[in-house]
Image (tube, grey):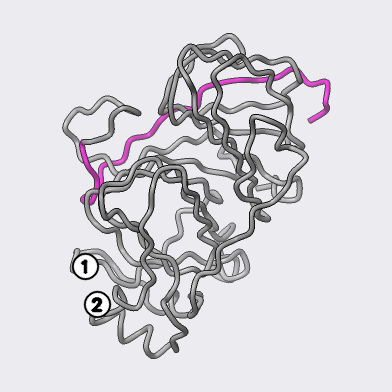
């Protein structure tokens, strides 16, 4: 898209998914109707290469792993799945699991998945709002109970479950064992970015997405990142973007953005911005 293209700024539709591990406690981002909402998806039609979600948990999610692009394509899939979590809320004791406490072998992985002891082999992290975690393809992981996160991921729904706390859902041990990394999780480094001018704070950059956050209390001119589109997830606040009203719990797609498009907060606003590196744009 050329730099002179007229900007398109639109709210993406929200898709609400009931989950057995979800919760009706989805406020202030959404209005609760008593359903156990586990995920709220935002996607365009046709799909973008990035998918954003809000995830709400009242129980631990399954222990799982996602394939990388190479393995996914060997199975006839379009792509693998690398994702990140940005924590919005965490009950006391709220945790996530990423990788193992120490190196294990594949037989230990198989045996522990079958008897449930994999839960104790994982490294569990206490989390708090504002933290971000990269979940690269191949990282064995789980979300704990009582957390709310925004997830940004490659557009893929391929998940290999290793253990599901006795819930009657299929496990995928062969594929999980073929793709899982067997050592500890290594935190990514923070980075400097030309796209991270104030008030944007750089969080993560991968081959698939770049993530920034911002706290905005005064009008802001949205500079165009070096990408054909950007996703703006409003995690707090309200106001207008390009003259259209926004509120917390929404995800806006901005394409062909020029300097001068205004974001005007009516209440203090928190934003997570995601966009793809140029090399990762094509579906």
Measured from the top left, where is residue 41 in percent x and y?
42, 38
The boundaries of the magenta stretch are 1-24
- Mark 2 or mark 1, which is nearer the start of the sequence? 2
Q: How many marks?
A: 2
Quarter where residue 262 is shown: top right
Q: Position of residue 215 (x, y in %)?
A: 54, 28
Residue to which mark 1 is pinned: 165
Give 76 or 80, whichever is nearer the viewer: 80
Q: Residues within 10 Å of mark 2 (few under 14, many from 20)?
A: some
Q: Residue at x 49, y 75 (%)?
A: 184
Residue 116 relative to residue 53: left or right: left
- Residue 19 on the magenta segment: yes
Image point (46%, 59%), residue name: 158
Task: Give the residue number, with chain letter if any, for mark 2.
Answer: 116
Displayed quadrant of residue 150: top left
In the picture shown, does residue 101 fall above or below 207? below
User: Marks 1 and 2, Cα distance to the nearest angstrom?
Assistant: 7 Å
């Amino acid at each position: 898209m050329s730099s002179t293209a007229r900007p398109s700024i639109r709210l993406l539709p929200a898709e609400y998914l009931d989950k057995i591990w979800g919760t009706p406690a989805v406020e202030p981002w959404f209005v609760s109707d008593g359903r156990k909402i586990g995920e709220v998806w935002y996607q365009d039609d046709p799909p973008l290469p990035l998918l954003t979600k809000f995830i709400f948990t009242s129980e631990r999610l399954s222990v799982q792993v996602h394939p990388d692009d190479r393995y996914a394509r060997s199975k006839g899939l379009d792509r693998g799945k690398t994702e990140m979590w940005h924590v919005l809320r965490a009950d006391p004791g709220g945790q996530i699991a990423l990788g193992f406490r120490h190196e294990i072998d594949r037989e230990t992985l198989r045996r522990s998945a079958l008897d449930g002891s994999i839960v104790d082999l994982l490294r569990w992290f206490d989390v708090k709002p504002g933290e971000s975690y990269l979940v690269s393809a191949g990282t064995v992981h789980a979300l704990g109970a009582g957390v709310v996160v925004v997830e940004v991921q490659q557009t893929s729904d391929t998940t290999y479950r290793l253990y599901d706390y006795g819930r009657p859902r299929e496990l995928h041990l062969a594929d999980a064992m073929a793709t899982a990394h067997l050592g500890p999780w290594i935190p990514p480094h923070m980075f400097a970015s030309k796209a991270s001018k104030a008030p944007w704070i750089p969080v993560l950059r991968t081959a698939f997405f770049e993530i920034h956050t911002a706290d905005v209390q005064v009008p802001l001119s949205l500079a165009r990142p070096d990408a054909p589109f950007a996703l703006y997830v409003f995690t707090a606040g309200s106001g207008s973007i390009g003259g259209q009203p926004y509120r917390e719990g929404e995800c806006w797609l901005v394409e062909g953005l020029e300097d001068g498009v205004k974001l005007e907060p009516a209440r203090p606003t928190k934003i997570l911005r995601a966009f793809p590196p140029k090399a990762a744009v094509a579906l």
